[in-house]
Image (tube, rainbow, N blue to C red):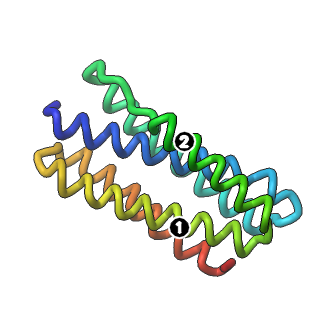
Amino acid sequence: MNTDTVYLLRECNSGCKCATNSMEQVMPFLKDKPHLRNLIEQYNDRHIKIGDECHALLNTVDCDEKDPPSVVKAFSWISTEMKLLVNDKPEHIAGLMVDGCSMGIKSLSGYLNQYENASEDSRKLTRKLIDLEQEFMNELLKFV
């Protein structure tokens, strides 16, 4: 496994973690919003599965996965909590999730371009995550 492949898989795995962290953070605000909650739970599970695939591929060559930077995680968590304290309506939560999907698509697309020598399997997995983010965003737009 070449270094581009390792770096791409680490970024893909990190993106999955960022997404699942965000989705799990908003769940408590969706107790009485079952349609949006179910949608987010469904996509959370799908992100976890892709993250597991990344992790398994990294394990085949004894490479560690990459966690999102602590500062980024803390800032994201605080920012989201503040936004939800001000407005926890379903359309606002869906909008926050749409913003996250957009950032994920942009970042992952950039990594695909940056790590152009990554293996085809790692590139397919990254495209699978990008497609999942796009699909999730389209579903979320029905709630905005």
Front-lying residue, 91 or 51: 91
Using residue 27 as the reference point, say whether residue 59 is left or right of it.
left
- The residue beneath circle 2 is 73
Q: Answer few, some or many: residues within 10 Å of disc 1's Cα (few below 14, many 20 plus, some between 14 and 19).
A: few
The amino acid type of the residue labelled 1 equals Asp
Place residue 103 in its image quadrant.
bottom left
- When the figure is inspected, residue 5 is found, relative to residue 15, above or below; the finding is above
x, y percent for residue 129: 40, 55
- What's the residue at 18%, 57% (across, down)? 113
Say whether residue 64 is visible: yes
Q: Position of residue 117 (x, y in %)?
A: 11, 46
Q: Which mark is residue 99?
A: 1
Number of the front mark, 2 or 1: 2
Q: What residue type is disc 2 on?
A: Lys
Query: Cα distance, mark 2 to mark 1?
Result: 16 Å
- Numbered circle sitting on residue 68: none
**Residue at x 35%, y 24% (from the top left corner):** 64
Residue at 30% in and 23% down: 63
Mark 2: secondary structure? helix
Label 1, secondary structure: give it.
helix
